[in-house]
């Protein structure tokens, strides 16, 4: 894959990047909505666009140069004119926020944007997982979308844009990101020094076109091992007894929580994939003084919770959603083996187990189970207890 001439880091999304570049050249809309599956690269593209808008290099064709003062501030996640808003709390939502409210929300962002830009240039706000804004948060945000502060670009990302009010969607220019071709994910992992060729091939398959997932797994080998174990356990569970099912189900949930914690830790914000190749020069010595971002110590914190029994509700819910995702992959792979197309399975390391299990299940198994997994996903979104959802899944997971 050819390296881009400018400092864009988004990979495997040529159409989306071309659209973003065209806007940077021809005039940026006030609000952008980046849509696509989780892990496809929406955040990376949002950061690329923000960097390009804030870059101070005299040649706009080089934006983002990744070398100027502004680009370096972004690298350390402390640019004063880049504002971020993301999910928070047990429900992993973006709340309305505001004075007197504990959690940062839309009103806090709106207040920040009402002040003048610090650097006097462009200003950017990235609202990650904007589809997780509560309804009152969306209503509060609408006013800003209708009358955005001068010189401000709002970048929203969403994996499920149907959750956004039509009035919000209609005021944004949309850029769609699709799944990234497997070869591109492989090349990305190898180029970034995150995996050798065989591991890159395996991770690229496993990620199903979502480089973010592949990168996270490459950085957290222990999580990759757990993921394989969870898949294998699910296959064994098809023929387990009822009492085993409930016990194993709970165990799967805590194993997935452990895996997710490992992935989150590996993907601490402010730690973009950095390799010697990725950084072009360090600038004049006086200018290059390292700036410690406030969160930079957090990744090494020995007190980061492991697979504790008392995992907070938001993490248990997130873990259950991840488990449902792995489960879907298992069903999908089972269906492929059933159809005699084992070459397309995502979990190649499970091939023997998949073939054994495929001989045991009914032809309608995959369709039935996918329906149940969809329902489970909806119930989790509706804040049903993750344990109850998983119990129901394991009990109905029969050949
Ligand atoms: Zn720059």
Image (cartoon, rainbow, N blue to C red):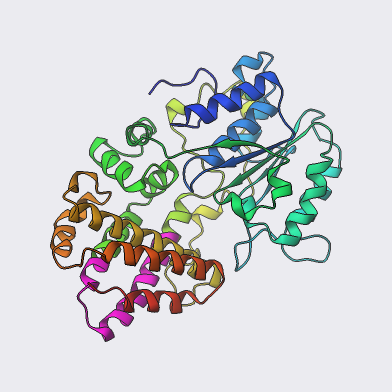
Q: In x, y percent, where is residue 371?
A: 39, 65
Res. 50 image quadrant:
top right
Q: In x, y percent, where is residue 196?
A: 27, 37
Residue at position x 60%, y 49% from top?
161
- Left-right relation of 296 to 399: right
Q: As drawn, which residue projects farthest toward the right? A: 115
In this rendering, does residue 320 appear at all?
yes
State the quadrant of the C terminus: bottom left
239 within the magenta span? yes
As drawn, 59 above or below 165: above
As drawn, 333 above or below 380: above
Nearer to us in this view, 342 or 243: 342
248 within the magenta span? yes
In this rendering, does residue 8 appear at all?
no
Q: In x, y percent, where is residue 217?
A: 37, 49
Q: In x, y percent, where is residue 36?
A: 52, 43
Nearer to us in this view, 22 or 339: 339
The kind of secondary structure the magenta stretch mainly shows is helix
Nearer to us in this view, 226 or 271: 226
- Left-right relation of 275 to 136: left
Ligand 1: give its quadrant: top right
Residue at position x 18%, y 48% from top?
342
Residue at position x 78%, y 66% from top?
101
Q: As drawn, which residue projects farthest toward the bottom? A: 243
As drawn, 1 above or below 101: above
Nearer to us in this view, 64 or 91: 91
Q: As drawn, which residue projects farthest toward the front? A: 364
Residue at position x 30%, y 44% from top?
205
What is the tally of numbered marks visible in this picture? 0
Q: As drawn, which residue projects farthest toward the top? A: 59
The boundaries of the magenta stretch are: 233-260
């Amino acid at each position: 894959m050819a390296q881009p001439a400018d400092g864009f880091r988004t990979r495997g999304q040529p159409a989306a990047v071309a659209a973003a570049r065209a806007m940077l050249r021809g005039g940026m809309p006030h609000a952008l909505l980046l849509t696509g599956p989780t892990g496809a690269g929406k955040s990376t593209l949002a950061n690329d666009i923000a960097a390009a808008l804030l870059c101070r290099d005299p040649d706009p064709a080089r934006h983002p140069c990744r070398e100027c003062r502004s680009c370096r501030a972004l690298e350390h996640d402390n640019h004063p004119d880049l504002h971020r808003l993301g999910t928070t709390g047990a429900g992993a939502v973006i709340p309305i926020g505001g004075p007197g409210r504990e959690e940062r929300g839309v009103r806090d962002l709106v207040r920040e944007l009402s002040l003048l830009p610090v650097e006097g240039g462009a200003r950017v706000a990235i609202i990650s997982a904007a589809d997780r804004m509560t309804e009152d948060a969306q209503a509060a945000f609408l006013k800003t979308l209708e009358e955005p502060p001068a010189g401000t670009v709002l970048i929203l990302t969403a994996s499920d844009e149907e959750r956004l009010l039509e009035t919000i969607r209609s005021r944004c220019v949309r850029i769609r990101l699709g799944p990234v071709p497997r070869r591109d994910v492989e090349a990305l992992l190898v180029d970034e020094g995150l995996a050798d060729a065989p591991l890159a091939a395996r991770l690229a398959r496993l990620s199903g076109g979502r480089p973010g997932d592949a990168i996270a797994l490459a950085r957290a080998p222990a999580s990759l091992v757990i993921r394989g174990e969870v898949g294998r356990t699910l296959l064994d569970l098809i023929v387990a007894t009822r009492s085993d099912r409930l016990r194993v189900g709970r165990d799967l949930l805590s194993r997935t929580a452990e895996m997710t914690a490992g992935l989150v830790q590996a993907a601490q914000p402010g730690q973009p994939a950095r390799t010697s190749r990725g950084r072009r020069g360090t600038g004049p010595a006086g200018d290059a003084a390292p700036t410690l971002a406030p969160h930079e110590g957090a990744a090494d914190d020995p007190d980061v919770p492991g697979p504790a029994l008392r995992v907070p509700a938001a993490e248990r819910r997130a873990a259950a959603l991840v488990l449902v995702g792995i489960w879907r992959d298992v069903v999908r792979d089972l269906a492929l083996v059933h159809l005699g197309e084992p070459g397309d399975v995502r979990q190649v390391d499970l091939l023997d187990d998949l073939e054994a299990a495929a001989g045991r299940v009914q032809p309608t198994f995959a369709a039935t189970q996918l329906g149940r997994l969809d329902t489970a996903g909806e119930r989790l979104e509706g804040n049903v207890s993750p344990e109850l959802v998983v119990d129901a899944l394991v009990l109905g997971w029969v050949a």
